[in-house]
Amino acid sequence: MAHADYSNYKGDETKEETLQSVVDSYEALSSDTQNWVANLANCSSLIWHAYHSLNIPVNWAGFYVINPEKQNELILGPFQGKVACQTIEFGKGVCGNAASSKNTQLVKNVNEYPGHIACDGDTQSEIVVPIVYENKVVGVLDIDCLDLNGFDKVDQKYLERLVEMISSSCKW
């Protein structure tokens, strides 16, 4: 199989099957390298194509990682979608809160989220999963959706599983 084939989703699978396929595909692709840039770039593509195959209007899927020059700040990493905020402080916005709390943030309506940082004003819902390595946050997975209630506990379950794999498969 060619690497690009991993992002070809059938479109007739359930959300659970599709998200499990993302996890499985990431595992296969990351077996070639432990480089976090390469792995997160491929992972962004897997997520983007998976959600679009499910007709869930994701408008941004990607990562923020710890800024090596400022340990309490996230810096833009690999992603799919429109240009984005370049830095986010811990404790600010959905990504910053996920990083500072080490807890997934499942936001049904970003307009009701105190301190939401709007990189794209069209975003309506968001999920952010912290990447924790050796009990330290090294980054976050951030996915934005154009619909309210774009994500649920099913997404959270599979994305947390994916992030556990990301944590252990990359050299941080």
Image (spheres, helix red, strand yellow):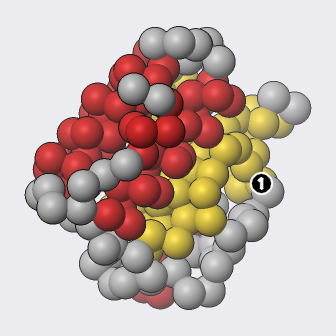
Image quarter hosting the N terminus: top left
**Residue farthest to the front, as pictured:** 1
Q: What residue does disc 1 label?
A: 87
Instruction: Indicate the quadrant where residue 124 lies.
Output: bottom left
Q: Is residue 49 visible?
A: yes
Q: Residue at x 38, y 66 (%)?
A: 52
**Residue farthest to the right, as pictured:** 69
Q: Is residue 2 left or right of residue 20?
A: right
Q: Residue at x 65, y 18 (%)?
A: 35
Q: Residue at x 42, y 39 (%)?
A: 5
Q: Residue at x 55, y 65 (%)?
A: 60
- Residue 84 position (above or below residue 72): below
- Secondary structure type for disc 1: strand
Residue 15 position in % (x across, y down): 17, 57
Image quarter hosting the C terminus: top right
Residue 149 position in % (x across, y down): 28, 78
Q: Is residue 102 visible?
A: no
Amino acid at dot 1: Thr
Q: Is residue 135 left or right of residue 35?
A: left
Q: Is residue 136 left or right of residue 8?
A: right
Q: Nearer the viewer, residue 4 or 116?
A: 4
